[in-house]
Image: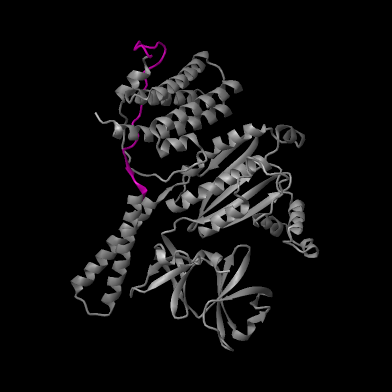
Amino acid sequence: MDLAKYRALFAEEASEHLSEISRSLLELEKQPDSREAIDVILRLAHSIKGMAGTLDYDDVAGRAHAVEDQMQALRKANRAATAAEITGFFESLVGLERAMAAASGDEESRLAADPSARGSEFSMQRSVSGTERCPTAVALARTDESGQERPGLPELELPTPPPTVRVDTAVLDRFLTTVGEVILSANLLRSAAVDVPVSPSFAAGLDRMDHVIGELQRRALDLRTAHLLRIVEPLPRLARELAQQLGKRVEVEIQHGDVELDRSILDRLSEPLVHLIRNAVDHGIESPEERRQRGKDEVGRIAIEASREKDSIRLEVRDDGAGVDLEAVRRRAIEAGMLIPDLAEDLPPAEIAALVFRPGLSTADAISTISGRGVGMDAVRATIEGLGGSVELATDHGKGTTTILTVPMTAAVQRVLLADVWGETVGIPVGRVHSVVEVPGERIENAGGESFVIVDEVPVPVLRLGRATSGESATLVLVAVRDECVALHVERVVGHHQIYVKGVPELLAGVRALAGLTLQGDGRPVFLLDPNQLT
């Protein structure tokens, strides 16, 4: 019998079980007498051992058996787990994860062995009621290697997870691209119908088509989304392991991890979040001795909180550590030539904190193996801004630091401001637009090869996109570009629309200012601009 299909299914289910065991161990570390956590780990170890045994994964079955024995011994002892025992449990879990990765060699098991890595598999689930027994898994869980009944182990009722259809991401992406083509084609048809007389039945058919395609678009967007928990779930264990290396104690709390984002955005958020956690553990959270001296709990706290704001998701990564020494940031910025000493003294705290995102600026005295991995805060900002979002940092020296990431919920559908530039229509993400102003052309001044305009008594750089004007009124779109406001000089603003964003053709892939495109009703392309790449 060909077991390849069953082994693939086992790898998927085992990966979910290993993640749940990891979460339960973290809970057991917080509450060493948690009978519920012990029961969950024991049940899942049973299940993994049973499934591995039927597929001749002897190493996996043996290591799962060891985890099972550890939990059973602790349950029989009817006492709280010691710190040494919990460390041993984690070591056993790592061994089980590595055995699983070696046995299956697929992406899901590799993720289980490396909490900081993320894959791109996507699943669609439909809910069902009730549970089913897994006779093979239960039977194997209740017997030892010789086939004898093991006393003291109750028969477990293993719930069957909701039926899941595993879809390759390439197949899903092709489907979503086709949906986008259907939407664009429908828009073309609707636009053409405006110019010719049509029968009432044809018009009714167009209305029905619009309704069905609108529903198809909503369903397609649902398929593109996944829970934030998918990338933040491994972070508590990652923080724990890093803290152990540094002789610290850390707990991570995840709040509102059930918010959903576009899969393409979610996958790119993983690396910045991992870096922020590394930074918090390495540079933010103090050692237990330092925390005691400062009147803090020995256990450092890190919170990851998500909230929805209109069409965006706001992520806050907070720690109660030492905070950022803004005077050190100011001093390093002066040494690096980023600030003029006389002006640096007058900078408000928020602007000094923003300097942390400048390339090459660090307040660490030495590069560590924990956070000094070639990914700085400038890379975090570049990634977030590349998603059409923004990043801020707030700190209170001695009390902690909060990093705020704001990203759009979806990359497929965006609301954009449409503007004419040299006879072409371009789109500017509405989320980046502060305002649109009309000013006399003579108010735009030139100095040193650069242009600027005074808006609300503040000089704003002007980037000319449209045709030059002389003495006429100029249309300026004020947008956020990194830490400043920039005025995009366009010929005129057409309006704002919600568009379905397609990828840029390969021929234009090297033009970084183009973030995507859509088609107008007459078939002409509208390119979506990335303001960060225009300066």
Q: Residue at x 68, y 43 (%)?
A: 283
Where residue 520 sits, quadrant-wise, is: bottom left
Q: Residue at x 67, y 39 (%)?
A: 285
Magenta residues, as a range?
A: 144-169
Q: Quadrant of the C terminus?
A: bottom right
Task: Say which of 147 and 227 sits in front.
Answer: 147
Task: Say which of 460 and 242 sits in front.
Answer: 242
Q: Position of residue 139 (x, y in %)?
A: 33, 18
Snapshot colouring = one colour
Task: Say which of 416 and 54 sits in front.
Answer: 54
Residue 507 in sight here: yes
Above or below for 45 versus 251: above
Above or below for 224 versus 531: above
Q: Position of residue 108 (x, y in %)?
A: 41, 38
Q: Quadrant of the N terminus?
A: top left
User: Magenta stretch containing residue 165, yes or no?
Assistant: yes
Above or below for 216 versus 29: below
Residue 500 in sight here: no
Where residue 468 sits, quadrant-wise, is: bottom right
Extreme-right residue of the structure: 342
Q: Residue at x 52, y 82 (%)?
A: 467
Q: Position of residue 10 (x, y in %)?
A: 35, 32
Q: Position of residue 85 (x, y in %)?
A: 57, 21
User: Magenta stretch containing residue 46, yes or no?
Assistant: no
Above or below for 355 versus 239: below
Left or right: residue 233 compared with residue 289: left
